[in-house]
Image (cartoon, grey):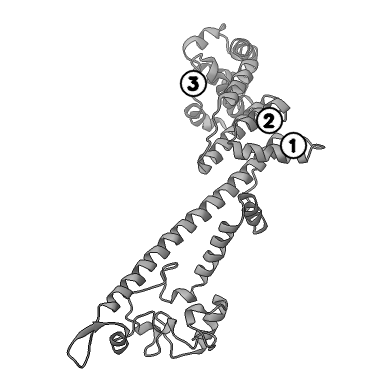
Amino acid sequence: MAGIMDIPTILSTIKPFNGNTEDYALFITRFNALVHHNPTIDDILKQNILISLLEGDSKELITSDQLSPESYADLRQNLEMVYNRTGDRKNQLLDNYRKLPFHQTDNDMMDKDVMKHVCLANSLERLQFSMDNTLVIKTFIEKLPSQIMRMVIKKNQRNSHHSPSFMETVKLVRTLISENRSVEEAEKRRKETTQINEVCTAEVNKLSTTRDKIPHHHSDGKKSYGHDQLAQRQPSPFATYRLAPCIFCAKDHESFKCTISTQEKVEAINKQKDICRNCLFRNHRTDKCKSRFACPTCKRKHHSSLCLEKSKMDTLVNLLSSTTSEELKTFFRTNGVEPQSIQKH
């Protein structure tokens, strides 16, 4: 509680009231908290503080030049009679609630709009207005983007024996927004992966074109272009990866066709101390590798076939390509993608 020495602080904290009805609720709330309900300040001092905070039209309500508990009570009563518009304030907040917009596409903006509705709801409940009113909840649902609105309505229909409260509806909406955000981020990563694959394909094609242009000298002095001459030059970074037997499982197939898991490939390479993890050649260590290539997915110095992050990304891309949006959202739910719960303040 504030003491006598805190009066200057109180006066600098409470904004003076100039007679604007819309400002009265905040003014009297702060005055009551810091002054009127402060047991260390007597009524005469409270009256002096109140008088010093009145400006404009509100000063006309000072009808007595006496300083006494009675005069203080009369002044407070005059202010309440003229400026206390609790009913008007409630109607104003309800009107603001009805007019408050809701973004239809941006998930972050949707989250902010939800919280704006919650803030207005808290203000209305402080005025003894129930936000669990069916019409109020319906107004909120009708503002939602059609996809989210549809899912909220279906959820409510499945639980026809229970009418959800306003805050339960808010929590459900935030959950759906979070799921939409997760799906959009996954689709964005899939698009980025597709672009990376296209770049890698272009690099492979470029290397193949260069290889075909290498001249081969025949005994008759003529030149031709083919794979024989390339085999005598420094092998390309893809060579070992495209030869049999497989460097991962030692079976009779090219390494790039190996179907064992990425984790098994990593373990197989780790057992072979003479293989570079970046280019998969046996004539140097990974830290001495001069290849300019790195993993296109995580940018680390290892071959793309050994990338655990790429394996996870491929799984997600396959999931996105083979499931519906509803199934994908179920996948995110089962893997723990849930929004933070909302606490009313």
Question: What amino acid does circle 2 point to?
Answer: Ile
Asked whether the viewer can see residue 40, the reply is no
The quarter of the rendered structure image containing the N terminus is top right
Q: Residue at the spot x=29%, y=78% of the render? A: 212
Residue visible at 29% across and 89% down in the picture: 232
Q: Which residue is mark 1?
A: 164
- Using the rendered image of the protein, determine whether residue 316 is visible from the camera's viewpoint: yes
Dot 3: element: loop
Task: Tell me the quarter of the picture where residue 176 sits.
Answer: top right
Instruction: Tell which of 326 and 217 is nearer to you.
Output: 217
> Measured along the vertical axis of the image, is residue 70 above or below residue 308?
above
- Residue type at mark 3 is Pro
Please identify the residue farthest to the front as the structure is shown.
Answer: 220
Are dots 2 and 1 in contact, CB under 8 Å?
yes
Residue extending farthest to the right is 161
Q: Nearer the viewer, mark 3 or mark 1?
A: 1
Q: In this rendered view, identify the residue nearer to me: 45 or 273.
A: 273
Image coordinates for residue 121, horizontal then vertical, percent: 64, 30
Residue name at image x 41 percent, y 79 percent: 278
Distance Cα–Cα, label 2 vs label 3: 37 Å
| Lower sequence index among marks 3 and 1 | 3
Sequence order check: which comes first, mark 2 or mark 1? 2
Q: Considering the numbered disc 2 on the image, is that residue within a helix, a strand or a loop?
A: helix
Tag 1, which secondary structure? Answer: loop
Picture quadrant of residue 137: top right
Q: Residues within 10 Å of mark 2 (few under 14, many from 20)?
A: some
Q: Quadrant of the C terminus?
A: top right
Q: Position of residue 217 (x, y in %)?
A: 21, 88
Q: Which mark is residue 54?
A: none
Give the amino acid at mark 1.
Pro
Point out residue 209 in the picture as x, y percentages from the top left corner: 30, 73
